[in-house]
Image (spheres, rainbow, N blue to C red):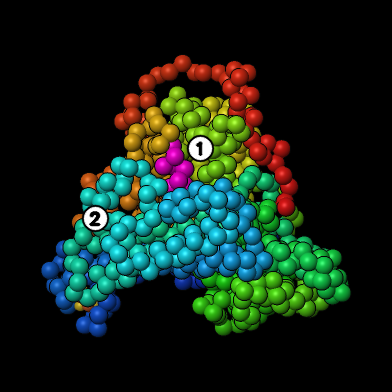
Amino acid sequence: MATRNGCEGCTEITCQSTKEVLAAAPAQNVITAYDRVQRRGMSACLFGSGGTCCRNCNMGPCQIIDGIEDMVGICGATADTVAARNFARIVAAGTAAHTDHAREMVRGFIDTAKGEGPHQIKDEAKLKSLAEVFGIATEDREINEIAVELGEKALAEFGKQENTPLSMLQRATEKRQELWKKLNIFPRGVDREVVEMMHRTHMGVDQDYENIMLQASRCALADGWGSSMLSTELTDIMFGTPVPRRAIVDLGVLKADQVNVTVHGHEPLLAEALCIAAQEPDMQELAKKHGAKGINLAGVCCTGNEILMRRGIPVAAGFVQQEIALATGAVEAMVVDVQCVMESLGQVVNNFHTDIITTNYRAKMPGGVHIQFDEHEAINSAKQILTHAIKNYKKRGECFIPEEKKLDVVVGFSHETINYTLGGRFRASYRPLNDNIINGRIRGVAAIVGCDNFKLADDTHEIIARHLIKNNILVLATGCAATSLGRAGLVNPEAARFCGESLAEICETVGLPPVLHMGSCVDNSRILIAATQMVKEGGLGEDISDLPAIGTAPLWMSEKAVAIGQYFVASGAQVVFQDLPTSGAKRFNKYLLEGLMGPLGAHWNVESDPQKLAELMVEKIEQKRDALGINKKSERVLFDMNMRRELSGGVPGAGCTGPA
Ligand code: NFS
Ligand code: SF4
């Protein structure tokens, strides 16, 4: 195996912990994606990056050059049709990933409602409010009875065949619902929209890019409002709606004297079971018998975000750091389920005693040890996995754990928490947020979401966030972007000092971080709800498309990020990415970047430079403020004592709790 020389030449890496691990002795024979990016160079295929390579039938593959008559597909397909089909298939794949995850959560919810398995119904208020959405009676009924009915109705949404809208979409603003009806893009059944998308992009079906994008919107809406939102809400009901708490995000959370188990992937059923099992006396004793002081669980990727939000379990690594966590040599097992798990992990562990434990029949890998997670025997399954990890502890060789950076984060901002935090404990509402936006002390709201990506510098999220908060824009973050902003020290109240004056004042008064961690990528649905609540609160227009708000997933990597982008656009929110695989098709690209404004009131934007991207976000927010007529010069309002009392009374996490 080729050796690497520390992280020399890895100019893209800015994370100190990552650099330290790569420079330390245990990592010397580890090849990471950073190396592979450099070795391969950046010359990606132009047809692939521009979206004009088609292999949808066996007359091709066809590589199409826009504007050259002979360079259409053998079937005559133009660059626009091919790029639109490819783009729509990305949306379908991303939707499939989210919805398959959501279905598992609904099934787990039904088990819980029936009293099977280790979990309980924790958030009864949310259960009842969701029951209402599904038209389920709640009065004089047992909680579990309501939950079973809710679970079964939720499960039926996936295979629904009637031409009626999915239930959760009633939560959108009336104006948006009317628009979806008018465009005939109300999603009907979650699975059906993915199937129809795949069908319509099959050879010889839909060859009109505008029409293809209607179904792409419908498919994405089935993801965001239809199933991701369902997953988030039911997960909250089972595991508790997040409240603010302090925690750590850093590779340095691994412990030299404990069995380190990193949990990587997406579905929180497994992670929750591991959290419960790791605390049980028999597991603790077993760890001690094998010479360790205990079991240290740490999260990776979105599973990490799920247990960070609800339990304050530390996150060791985001997407780009999954190999780095293993390169410490200090991990006994990396337990994985589905999505964003790199195949290279199986090779990285060849250097160490570490096992990759795959737990989901859908996702096995060369070099992995498979222990199927059985949700009906969740704790026993989790114990079997932990036992395997514990037995590895004595085999640990040389390891290097970077010093913990003590950069803590305050996480747990569900839409409910924002409501309480800003609205006051006795008067939970978005009114103060709206008022502060209207009076200009908060200019608007920006979401920084999605992945990180080895192709681009890992301080991109930080550059964008710093510019936004400096300009008094409140940032909402999810997914690996939130992890990266946590590492940058922006997800805690002390970061108020990096804000513009008026946002700083609000953050300091309320004890609020200027970057609010709202959870995993599935939890982007929380942002849809928060935005809708802002509209319903009044004063900021009639629809999400009126709000001074914008989203970005600058370092997107996964198809899921494109599905998310499309459901935001179809919900009326502007979205900006650093690139899109559509640049090889002029008309279609223009349609995404401008034309969608017509039907949807929002469109995609592309800007490769992080600083310019942030400036674009500010500009778009200011344009919305102009359109709302709230950019009038107004007197600066200072907080008087009453306002302070009102605000600080509402911070459940003012003196935030430590890890649970
Ligand atoms: Ni979202 Fe989360 Fe991370 Fe990207 Fe992957 S873990 S679901 S897809 S890489 S943010
Ligand atoms: Fe080529 Fe058309 Fe077949 Fe695509 S569908 S591979 S463009 S012939």
Residue 529 lies in the magenta-colored region: yes
Q: Are marks 2 and 1 in contact (CB under 8 Å)?
A: no
Three-letter amino acid code at the position of disc 1: Leu
Residue name at image x 28 percent, y 51 percent: 180
**Quarter of the picture holding the N terminus:** bottom right
627 with respect to 350 (left or right): left
Overall secondary structure of the magenta stretch?
helix
Residue name at image x 57 percent, y 71 percent: 337
Image location (x, y in percent) of residue 190:
37, 64
Q: Which residues are magenta?
A: 524-534
Asked whether residue 26 appears in the rendered view, the answer is no
**Residue 34 or residue 575, whichever sits in front:** 575
74 with respect to 452 (left or right): left
Image location (x, y in percent) of residue 80:
21, 63
**Residue 391 or residue 218, whichever sits in front:** 218
* Neighbour tally class for label 2: few under 14, some 14-19, many 20 plus, Cα within 10 Å: few
Considering only vertical position in the picture, is 377 above or below 492? below
Residue 493 lies in the magenta-colored region: no
338 with respect to 377 (left or right): left
Residue 184 image label:
2
Residue name at image x 58 percent, y 22 percent: 643
Question: How far is disc 2 from disc 1 in space, using C-alphas?
Answer: 34 Å
Three-letter amino acid code at the position of disc 2: Asn
Does dot 2 land on a helix, a strand or a loop? loop
Asked whether residue 247 appears in the rendered view, the answer is yes
Residue 474 image label:
1
Q: Earlier in the sequence, mark 2 or mark 1?
A: 2
Give the quadrant of residue 328: bottom right
